[in-house]
Every structure is written in C-alpha cells, then in structure tokens.
Amino acid sequence: MSISTAAIRSVLVEPREPDRPSPPGPEPARAPVARCADGHGTMTGLFFSDNVVDIARAKAMCGLCALKDSCLADALEREEPWGVWGGELLSGGRIISNKRPCGRPPKHPRPAVVIDELGPVDVVA
C-alpha cells in the first residue's frame, strides 16, 4: 500500500474542518489587549524605571494603546504609588508632568531628545 506524494501534499495543504464548528451568527468581538501585556512581565522594568529615557519609552508605548484611558483611570482610582500608567507618570498616586534626571541641572540647557517606544530617535535643535 503506497501513497503518492500528490495525495500526501493534498492532505497537508487542504484546510480541515474545525473540531467544533463556530456558532452561527457574527463572530464575537475580541476585547482589546494592552500593548504592555505580553503575559511574561518583561515590560515591568520599563514601566517602573527611574531612568528618564525608559519613562519616555513607556509613555510612547502607552500613547498608542487602545486601553490607555481606562488604565490611567484605574491606576488613579487605586492610587498607584509609582510607574507609567496610561501614558502618564505617577508618583505618590498623582500624575507628575516630568521627571528630572538625578544630579545637578546643566548650566547650559541640552537640546531636547525625541524618544519613541524603541528609544531615542532624534535631537530637536
């Protein structure tokens, strides 16, 4: 009993019927998933960092998230002590506009750096 390669290819390529067919009607809508939720907690260091670049990256990531408004509202309701929530930096359960880097401020202001979710992009003159 030999099976031809054409028969094997047709079995492997043709889609099979699902074990459980979906119910009739429209497919249920999927709930949006937060961009920071990867299921493994790998973004925790980014969203709870003291580094100014990490904070800017986390804010940029939240800026494109569909759940940022509800995330921020829930964090403010829980009075989260720190971290980036819904695109805003929280400290002591309140929104703070920005975090300065540690140390003395420079005598001559440095040019602003544009940061997206992957890191520094460009220097604004």
Image (cartoon, rainbow, N blue to C red):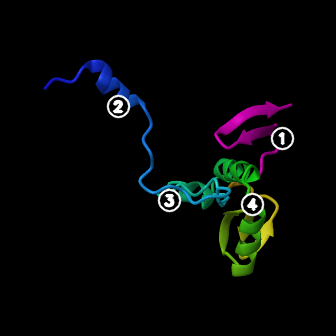
Which is more toward the observer, 64 or 89? 64
Which of pointers 1 and 4 lies earlier in the amino acid sequence? 4
Disc with the residue nearer the chain's start (2 vs 3)? 2
Q: Relative to 119, is 108 on the left or the right?
A: right
Query: Which residues, given as a range, are shown in magenta?
Result: 104-125
Q: Give the Cα distance between marks 4 and 3.
A: 18 Å
Q: Residue at x 71, y 70 (%)?
A: 91
Return the residue at label 1: 108
- The answer to whether mark 1 and mark 2 are in CB contact below 8 A is no
Residue type at mark 4? Answer: Lys
Disc 2 designates what residue?
A: 11
Can you say which quadrant of the picture contains the C terminus?
A: top right
Residue position marked by numbered label 3 in the rendering: 41
Nearer to us of marks 1 and 2 is 2
Q: Is residue 99 above or below residue 78?
A: above
Q: Which residue appears farthest toward the bottom when viewing the image?
A: 78
Residue name at image x 72 percent, y 60 percent: 67
Horizontal and vertical percent position of residue 16: 42, 41
The picture quadrant where one finds residue 124 is top right
Tag 2: amino acid: Val
Pair 2/4: label in front: 2
Q: Determine crowd level at label 1: few under 14, some 14-19, many 20+ residues with C-alpha closer than 10 A.
A: few
